[in-house]
Image (cartoon, coloured by chain):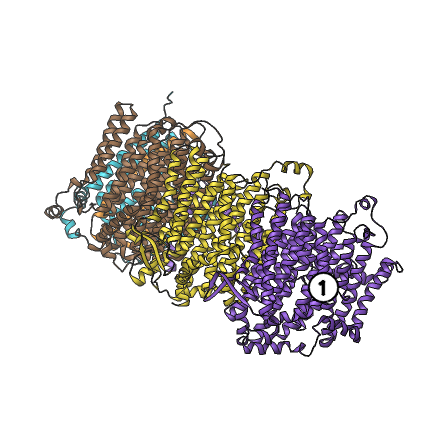
Chain colours: A purple, B brown, C yellow, D cyan, E orange
Amino acid sequence: MEYLWIIPFSPFIAFVIIGLFGYKFPREPLSGIVAVAGVAISAIASVIGFIDVAKTGGYYNLKLFSWLTIENYNITVSILWDPLSALMTCVVTCVSTFIFIFATGYMKGDESYPRFFAYLSLFVFMMLMLTLSDNLVQLFFGWEGVGLASYLLIGFWHYKKSAANAAMESFVVNRVGDWLFLLGILLAFATFGTLDYLQIFNKLPEAGYVVITAIALLLFGGAIGKSAQIPLHIWLPNAMEGPTPVSALIHAATMVAAGVYMVARLMPVFAASEVALDTVLFVGTMSAFIAATMGLVQNDIKRIIAYSTLSQLGYMFAAEGLGLFSEGMFHLTSHAVFKALLFLGSGSVLIALHHLLDVQKMGQIGRAMPITMGTFLIGSLALAGIPPFVGFFSKDPIIEGAYEINSFVFMLLWGGAFLTAFYIFRLFFLAFFSTDRLDHHTREHVHESPPNMTVPLIVLATATVLLGFFREFFMNFLRPSLDPHSMKFLSEETKRIVWEGLSRSSHVEIEPNAFHFLGHSLTSFLGIVILGTALAGIFTAFLIYQLRKVDPVKIGDMFQPIYKLFYNRWYFDHIYYAIFVYGYYKLSKVLWFVGDKVIIDGVVDGSAKVSIFGGDIFRKIQLGRISGYVLQMLIGTVIFIALFFIIR
Amino acid sequence: MGILLSIVADLGVPNFYVLIPEIIVLTVALTILVLELFTKNKSLLSALSIFGLGLAAISVFFIQEGDKTLYGLYIVDTFSLWFKFLILITSITIFAVFNPYIDSKRSYYGEHYYLMLFSILGMMIMVSSPNLITMYMGLELMSISLYILVGLLKRDYKSKEGAFKYLIIGGAGTAIISYGIALIYGKTGTFDLIGIALKLQDNIDVGGIGGLVLLIVGLALKASAVPFHFWTPDAYEAAPTPITALMGGVAKLATYATIVRVTVDAFGGSSEVWAPAWAVLAAASMVVGNFIALRQKDVKRMLTYSSIAHTGYILAALASGNGVGFFAILFYAMVYVFMAIAGFLFLSAFERNEGWTNSVEDFKGLAKRHPIMALYMLILMFSMLGIPPTAGFMGKFGIFLSLISADVWWLTIVLVITSVISAGYYLRIVANMYMYEPISKAKFNLTQIEKAVIGFLSILTLLLGVYPAIFWEISNLLTNSLLMTAVAR
Amino acid sequence: MTPTFETASFPILSVSILIPFVAALIVFALNEKVAKPISIVASGIVLAISSYLMLVYDPKDYKIQFYEKYEWIPQFGISYEVGVDALSLTMVWLTALAFFVSFIWSTNIQNRVKEYFISFLILEAACIGVFVAWDLVAFYVFWEVMLIPMFLIIGIWGYAERLYAATKFFIYTFFGSLFLLIGVVGMYIYNFYSNKVLSTSYFDLLNVDLPHNLEIVFFLLLALGFAVKVPMWPFHTWLPAAHVQAPTAGSVILAAVLLKMGTYGFVRFNLPWFPEASKVFMPVMFTLGVIAIIYTAMMAIAQTHIKRLIAYSSVSHMGFVTIGTFALNMEGVNGAIITMISHGLTSGALFLAAGFIYERLHSYEMKDLGGMAKFVPVFATLFMISVMASAGLPGLSGFVGEFLALLGTFKVSILTAVLAGLSLVVGAAYTLWLYKKTMFEEELLSEERLKEYSHIKDLNSAELWSFLPLVIFMFVIGTYPNWWVNLINSTSAFVLHKIVGG
Amino acid sequence: MDLNLIAFWSLSTIAVLSALGVVFFRNIIYAVLSLISTLIAISGLFFNLGAELIGALQILIYAVAIVVFYVLVISTVPKYEGEAIDLKYSLLSTPFAFILFMELAYVSVYGLWVSGTGVFGPAMLNQVSNVKAVATMLFTKYLFPFEVASVILLVAMIGAIVLGKKDIVED
Amino acid sequence: MSVSYEYYLVLSGLLMVIGLIGIIIRKNIIALLISTELMLNSVNIAFVAFDIKLQDVAGQVFVFFILTIAAAEAAIGLGLIMAIYRMKRDVDVTKISELKG
């Protein structure tokens, strides 16, 4: 399995080549080609590895080199290749490949074309370091690395103030999560003396419950930041300032899912602590619902999809919190595909509309760009959870599982499903159908995108249609990584702990076979209700935005407070801005003035002033007159002698 | 009559051979006294003086180190010989640059030369006195010559005023010293330092303390320690600058040497009395000297206050009251004399130039107008501040060593704080020299000798900081010489 | 644990101190045209020597290598004693690198070229001396000598308020070092009292068995001296002033080398000499370190002057070194040392960047800057790498040190580690803020400004070659810290041997 | 009543009173005359103690030579018209001067002064007079300081001439 | 001797202090010089008293030297006063204060 090193380093080499020579060559399309080649090679390698691991179900641990030795523990750069990482790697590389291809078209004519592909390649490299890692430090390396790439790509059009701000915001907010994550690493090291996953898992029984909980929660803190869960979600919608392929790749398909992947990767740790699982569940659920509500009333096409990403990530976390790790990972995979599709579709729309973002100003563009519309529709349906698209097979089981385990969670996720269907079709209708609100000039230029953009769309759409039917394959495939009984690398003791931790979902039986599942949900009450909800959402959207039977403005007025709450994104941004941006900045300014300038420098410069003042005072004794001199000498002598007779 | 004769006969014949350096200096002085009536040739007089001083300095090496001579009124030991040598050679530098200065002031008196020689003679007598009488006479010869020299600037009222202040306060100081000596005499019945030490040993009482304290006050006055420093700034400023160098450098050196000898030889056993006394004076000098220097615009006056502060540093070593202290004080005194003389001679060289008023402002842009001299001044300033690798640092290092070895922490802290404050004014000069544009482009008119002398002194300051072992060895020898004299009896 | 010595067959360390000094004399004698080449060659040789020493240094057992000792002031038992262990060696290397870089950078000094290079060369000699000296007086001499050229550098080639800054720098550090001197002298005397040995050698003073209260006193005296130099909060205010006013190369040296002396002092002297006091003061140092990290990070973001921002960031990073050092375990000390090296590289690079920006746009104020990235892509890239290294991005040098320091701290005080870890957030905030304000947001520029911008040139070759070594080593340390940690491991163990035993 | 005692008290009273006169007489001539009076009284005390040579020298050098000098100068300098004493300074200095006096007196009274260590006891002085004893010592043992004293006087003489003479303006 | 030597000492101290007061409070610079003479002379009393008590002659020798020095100082002082008067046309001590600070 030594060839596995090709997977991360192929995009890295592409990055180096483009980074050093990108501007020297004819910029377009050579940089794009290099980048695509880099990621494609890596995709091929990972697919080969995927097949390999699918056959054997085993795991490989490839140590590349030793990074740092602490005490007796060797932090290495290495590759852990098991079904979980193989799945994630494949998702990353395959989706990336298509997005890269799309980007060669999307970025055409941009003066920083090579830079874009350099960043993208860097991102893929970092992401692969993350997914392939066998220890927490390398994970953290990739974790921060994708943060960097995300920062660079969000700020790709850095001449825009909003892009620069969004980039910085994303990095700093992520850093809050990373802070917790790093502390988690430190605690883990202090507890276990090692940071390799497998060693940690097997040492779990030695550690106390509280410590494990703390480690899990701190690491999850990192996931909250990276996967933009509430309350650290605010950066993701703003991150849409980046070029659309970036949004598709990083802020939908891969990077933001890193948190989900991390939780799954460390499943035994999380499973060992109920509190941790509950936290994951709670955060995921809340994010799923709240983000959906926010998505309802946005008008920016990319932001709507971004909120939907938040929401779907919430579903994944909810699945993991419920103990349904495989379902979570499956949803991750399917989400990567259809969300990439949706983003690329919207990218295609943006190219056609010259980066017009407001859905309220679009309309009836479906006719001019049928492929985009068709694929977008497929993506929307998948997102809404309509069979036979992959979203149905990955999202419904989560909701059904929640029904079995926790009714409160179920209510929210169920509600979320309605909202999801509603907002995505609101977008769909407003953009592609409805009335024609485009201005005349743009109208004339609306056209279908070139093949290097539509082909990825079609491929992804195909995948969206077909992937769901591989449900059973995926479930079995992931078993060696996520089912405690099949995890070869766990000791018996750990297996027991993990199994106990997952007991909350042990009674849940979800049909793995796609056809059976489809049949089951079309027959069971619960299945029909969920499906019906999704359809209801679509219908409502159709009613309001296509048929215009109900005026959305009136509804907005009717529920003024709620509308405002949603529209202002539950005031998260405002509060954060007030406290952490404005407040922090102002406090810093005040502290600088008071603390540094007045107090500390006051003392420092003050002592200089006191010295000078003292000099002026002492100068007065030298008043130039002999009488005075002698008088002072007399006084001095008197005191001097007195010192020896009185004090002694 | 017979009784008297027998007493006198015991004294034996004085050994005038050991007086050769003094005799040379005296002879030269008297020769100039006569010669000056017949010639107006200043170079001749100056050369003669330098020749005499050089000869005397060389002759120091040919003197057999011996015991006391002249009926116990004169001592020839390593200590006195070395200091004599140092006094002589440092004086040479002053004579070397004296003529141009006095020309520029158009204030020529032939008396300058022999009066300076007389004062140097007084210093030589001071440092080789095993006896309070000799010390007193040497001190007075030095002081009285200096009173005159200060006031010798023609048509300069300030010179007279400074001299008069110096005279009155110096006179009062003389009276105080005399009174102290009287009390000590009354207490011990002798003027001999060792005799005093024997009498006092460890039963120093009120009378002894009184005498000692008054003696300290008097000596502190001569060494210009606060609060007996008042004459210093005025006299130093008033005096012709080379004379200031003589007072601030050579005379100070002799005074410190005398102080050390008196304290060690005569009062070695009562360090618990004089150590705190010197400590108080040292602390006061450091504080007052440095603070006032901070506010001086006139560099000459600033250097004066800095010299008061340095008196504080030097005396601080005595506060430790142990051998390390003597060690340190001797070293510091020896290196300080170079710094001080160089500093004042620097001013004397520049003072000759048109438009130079010794004000801090005049130093602006000196590094561009005269880079070499600015570099010398830089070295001097950092040396006075006590930054390595200059001799000033090694001096302060010794002081710290002595203070801490004696656990005089409070004085150590005072020294530290005041040193930091002193950085304020030393740096101001450096900053003015290097960090401002010149206020005038006029060329400086400096003689080669001036440059060479100042260069020599400042380079020496630097070298003594880089390799101070020789001077430390000398201080070591001197301390041993002193302590051995004290213990041997 | 008594260190052993491996005497040098050739006085290579003395030679590396002498080379810059001799170069200074040569420059003094010749005209100003050759000043720069001579300086570059001299510092290049020193860099080559120190790199060579790093490669041949034997990190296995702790011994002082390339050791030389000559009598200097025998009356006091003072000698000239130089040698290196890994800590010294890395610092010497860092010094050599920083000076090399600064010399290459210093192309457009028009004013008093000769003096400029002489000052820097003497400064280099002194800085190397500080790190290799094992005799305390020699150490102190080098330590103080450095003040003079630095004072002149800030004062002569600085900006508007240079005089204030230079004086403040000088007096403040002088104040601190005098207390250091007192502490050293005190140790020396106490050593004499207890062991009857007159010696200022580090190794002799290592064996002083101090009573507890004296240990505390001496610890404090030394710590005060070092704290001012580090600078630790609240002794840091000289640093922003000095940095803001210093010329670019001066800032680089100040940040890369001078600040290290303080932390070097802590590691070298305070821990091995005062093991008990170090334990006692651990909470205090932690508190100060944490305040330094967070408070000065806040200070940094409050700045509009980019050099002052970077200066505050230095203080913040030094906080990491402080807490790492006083974690009193291997990870902590290793982390502290790595952070020292890394900070030398990153802050050096950041100051170069600030200098670059000033040379192109003639302002340090954020309101005059912004939107450069498009016009100077190479610079923007290197600047970004430096910024990220400073923000502690894994894979670059900054992270390694911070990680180790945090790890060490975490074992001792979780709270400290938690708070210090916040620098991940606040540090990112100010560095990115800096980057954004200088490089991004082109659309805020006015038309005329844009026109001016179109003339600015990317890094010229001198600037590029001074930037590159720093950036390369950020990667080298970040991606393969094992080599560096192996290098310093035995040294850290020695530093801690009285505290953790062994 | 011992004659010595009477002499001491009367002479010391004169000395102190005329010393106060030196300080407080407005007219400088009176002050100089008071000085003479003090000096003569002190010289009387010397005689009283038995130090005849010093007593005589005191009168010769001081009361005659120096005071003549003073009178000469005073005659050149016109009469000083201002206040004799500065009130502020007198108020400030008196308490301190008093304390200093008390301190000196304390030292004088409580000091354990030794006596009779020398060889010139009454028996000896009866054989050789005080004058002879002092003079002999002065020219033998204390020859060196004596020579120095002569140099000092030479210096002072020159100094007085140089300082006192009118500057001839040279051009 | 029936007069205790302490009396001489006290007298000496008293004259000394009076001389000191004289320097401080007099405004005429000639009087300052006279007061200095007074101080120097007061010491003589102490010396002679001690000398007699000790049955030594060294004290008297010292007094001789003090006399010499007093004379020398007086001479120089008067010379200076002449010079000052010639330049300043005043002998008021409050005016003789150009050097200060």
**Quadrant in the rendering for residue B117:** top left
Quadrant position of residue B253: top left
Tell me which amino acid carries mark 1.
Answer: Leu
Dot 1 corresponds to which residue?
Answer: A466
Q: Nearer the viewer, residue A544 or D105?
A: A544
Q: Could you tell whether C76 is left or right of C443 in the image? A: left
Q: Which secondary structure lies at badge 1?
A: helix
Placement of the C terminus of chain A among the 4 image quadrants: bottom left
Q: Residues within 10 Å of mark 1 (few under 14, many from 20)?
A: some
Q: Is residue A498 visible?
A: yes
Residue A240 percent across, percent down from the top left: 70, 54
Residue A148 seen anywhere in this rendered image of the structure: no
| Above/below status of B415 relative to A183 | above
Q: Going by the picture, which residue comes out furthest to the right?
A: A549
In the picture, measured across the screen, residue C163 lies left or right of residue D39, that is: right
Residue A394, percent across and down? 71, 68
Name the foreground residue: C393 vs A523.
A523
Relative placement, left or right, of C410 versus E43 is right
Q: Residue furthest left?
A: B2
Q: Chain of mark 1?
A: A
* B300 lies above or below C412: above
Q: Nearer the viewer, residue A646 or A9?
A: A9
Q: How far across and how far down the image is residue A641, in percent?
A: 37, 54
| Image label count | 1
* Residue B64 screen position, x and y as percent: 16, 43
